[in-house]
Amino acid sequence: MVPLNWYMLLSAAVFTIGVFGFLSRRNIIIMFMSIELMLNGVNISLISFSHYLQDMRGQILAFFVIAVAAAEAVIGLAIVIALFRNKATVHVDKINEMKG
């Protein structure tokens, strides 16, 4: 059986890669992918604690996190497509205002 600390190290590594990707890149799509990595890192820790403690609450919470991440991806990509149609760029530095 795999020890709990290995899952925590994997979770921390995935979350750290997501934070680094979000802070270092200026492309909106890569920023969304980095947010998804951070959410998946949290899911790994929730599910591993749930398995370790023999409790289903962590797995149920991870299911809700996945649902929220899917909704965030849909709404975020819709906003990116709308911005790309108006500005023709997906770089955050070039988009400085949002007009309605």
Image (spheres, rainbow, N blue to C red):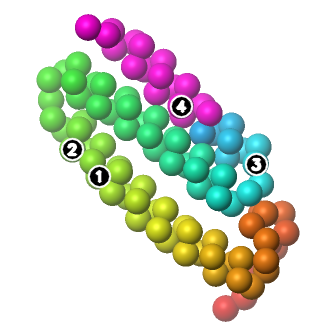
- Label 1: which residue? 64
- Label 4: which residue? 14
- Sequence-wise, the earlier of marks 4 and 2 is 4
- Sequence-wise, the earlier of marks 4 and 3 is 4
How many neighbours does mark 4 have within 10 angstroms: few (below 14), some (14-19), or many (20 or more)?
Answer: many
Identified at 49% across, 71% down, the residue is 75
- In the rendered structure, the answer to whether residue 47 lies left or right of residue 54 reads right
Secondary structure under badge 2?
A: helix
Task: Identify residue type, mark 1.
Answer: Phe
The spot of residue 64 in percent (x, y) is 29, 52
Task: Identify residue type, mark 4.
Answer: Val
- Quarter of the image where one finds residue 84: bottom right
Pointer 2 with pointer 1, Cβ within 8 A: yes
Disc nearest the viewer among 3 and 1: 3
- Label 2: which residue? 60
Q: Could you tell me how far apart the alpha carbons at marks 4 and 3 are, in whole angstroms?
A: 16 Å
- Label 3: which residue? 25
Q: Could you tell me how far apart the alpha carbons at marks 3 and 1 are, in whole angstroms?
A: 28 Å
Q: Could you tell me how far apart the alpha carbons at marks 4 and 1 are, in whole angstroms?
A: 19 Å
Q: Could you tell me how far apart the alpha carbons at marks 3 and 2 are, in whole angstroms?
A: 32 Å
- Which residues are the magenta region? 1-17
Secondary structure under badge 4?
A: helix
